[in-house]
Amino acid sequence: MNYLSLENLTKSFGDRKILNSISIGVDQGQKIALVGVNGSGKSTLLKIITGLESPDSGEVVFRNDITVRSLVQNPKFETSKSVLDAVFDSDDEALQLLNRYQKVMLHAERGESVDDEMQEVIERIDALNAWDQESQVKQILGKLGLKDLEADVTQLSGGQQKRVAMAQVLIQKPDLLILDEPTNHLDIDSIEWLEGYLSQANMALILVTHDRYFLEKVTNEIVELEQGKIFRYKGDYGNFLEKKLERQESESASIDKAQNLYRKELDWIRRQPKARGTKAKYRVDAFEDTKTKAFSGQKTAGLDLNATTSRQGKKVMEIEKLSHAFGDNKLIENFSYVFPKKDRVGIVGANGSGKTTFLKLITQEIEANSGTIETGQTTKIGYYRQQELRFNDEQTVIDFAKEIAEFVEYGKGQLIPVSQFLTRFLFPPEVQYKPIGKLSGGEKRRLQLLKILIKSPNFLILDEPTNDLDLITLNTLESFLESFDGCIILVSHDRYFVDKLVDHLFVFDGAGDIRDYNGNYTDWRLEEVAKAKESPKAKVVAPTPVVEKERRKLSFKEKTEFETIEKEMPKLEAEKSALIERMNSGSSDHDELIFWAKELERLNNQLEQHELRWLELSEFI
């Protein structure tokens, strides 16, 4: 069943054509990720779909009987509106009733007399059979960390407002959901919950995300925007990379062939007497077509990060008995650490656990309550902040860069003009003379990164560097950081990024303790999951060691169950893959699509149960 059709959409800004006759359809259950370099038109396309922008030509057609909801980068709310009212902002009767029920509960918790109203609300919820929906609402609010439901939503941080907006669209259970960078401002627990929720939800989805683990788990098709055109890839992120490479190689061969033919035709055109006019018009027309093909291969420029790293001395940075708190809120207590050369540290912990405070302490933005931080004489810190740099929107890109340096040390001692450095950062000459205010959000973040690397730091501190960067830039940034010859401290909710770059983690517990964990994010997360599974068992452990030892042996029945699960899981995975292929191929039968969606949900649930039980039993093997 088709939910959305985009027909011949075209959009230009000045002489730059962002979308060139784009056509695409979105069906029930289809989950599409839009990818492309910053400025390729991803956000523009989402704005056109949601009605925030108008195309120059073409149509956006939704199916009449579906519910469509969207979440943009910076949601706006009415002044003085509570979190609760913002979350339940809907014409749906059940949601309005659940909003009233939540408010009555808050009054009751304050000891106010609400018996009569409570009875009326409960009876109406019973009549609408809306208790399941109430349970889902409670789960969504809890998983997104929305606790103070009476707070003025306009007084919340940008990250908290995004969580409120996310809860609002999920609670309304749309048929088609449109999300622009949904993982920005969410902590890792919330991201993992959201990807599980969306991957199993029976809805169509269009999203823009830089989070590759999220993209891999949630979507079943990738649509790439490149030079105003779209390219569609069925399957996951790995398949996208493989098929994209095949397409580029094929296009490159085709372009090379056209260029060779163009040279021959150009020689023929030049040798013809001007007076021959239309005698060989078909040949001239063919020449123009060949010329267009030959010069169509403007390959997407690659970000070239090869900035020099300043020489690092023996002493990098030493932290001794560091402690810091805000009032009674103890964030860091008695932490000591000596950074070796080329150290690569990831920082993890819940929001508010002290991660950003720690960064501000080591960059001396704030002074610690106690303890010392000694930085080596040759240590040169580059700090990429989570907050976007404040630019002068009227200033041109080239003037901004020249304020920092006229020449940049690049590679092995080579000095290049700053304009060349900008070009290698994907700011070509025509963009360098544009006002910064005309840049996209991703391009501004790239400019922020340029400002840091242009100074040749040898100790990089990166606080959420992946926000608003496209996948191409991310891949290049990762390659640069992998070969970076200095220290790196990385705070990021992008699990793929952390896994690829760090050797160990500082784990903040929010109560002052910082644990130095030897491993990457996935290693640590698996350990935490295993601990969580063991924790409830500890409550029922028999008091004597002998009984405990006997209890940990698998019975014959459990061994059989373990072996059966090991055999069944690959079968279920194969069944799931086959089902997804059928869903991707589409169907005009509405009942069949609904059945497939329910069957996919059943398989996901069964696989999850098998995986959990397998983990439990494997502990005793």
Image (spheres, rainbow, N blue to C red):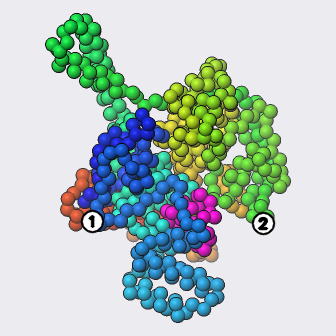
Say which residue appears at 50% left-offset and 74% top-offset: 138
- Which residue is label 2 attached to? 328
Say which residue appears at 43% left-offset and 59% top-offset: 70
What percent of the width, then of the height, locates residue 356? Answer: 68, 52
Instruction: Specify the amino acid type for callout 1.
Output: Ile
| Segment colored magenta | 140-167
Crowding near the residue tagged with mark 1, few <14, some 14–19, many ≥20 C-alpha atoms within 10 Å: some
Can residue 15 be seen at all in this image of the molecule? yes
The answer to whether residue 386 is left or right of residue 167 is right
The answer to whether residue 598 is left or right of residue 280 is right
Residue 176 forms part of the magenta stretch: no
Q: Residue 220 shows which numbered tag?
A: none
Can you tell which quarter of the image residue 542 is in? bottom right
Front residue of 116/287: it is: 287
Q: Earlier in the sequence, mark 2 or mark 1?
A: 2
Number of marks in the image?
2
Q: Assign the N terminus to one quadrant of the image.
A: bottom left
Residue 163 forms part of the magenta stretch: yes
Q: Residue 594 shows which numbered tag?
A: 1
Q: Secondary structure at mark 2?
A: loop
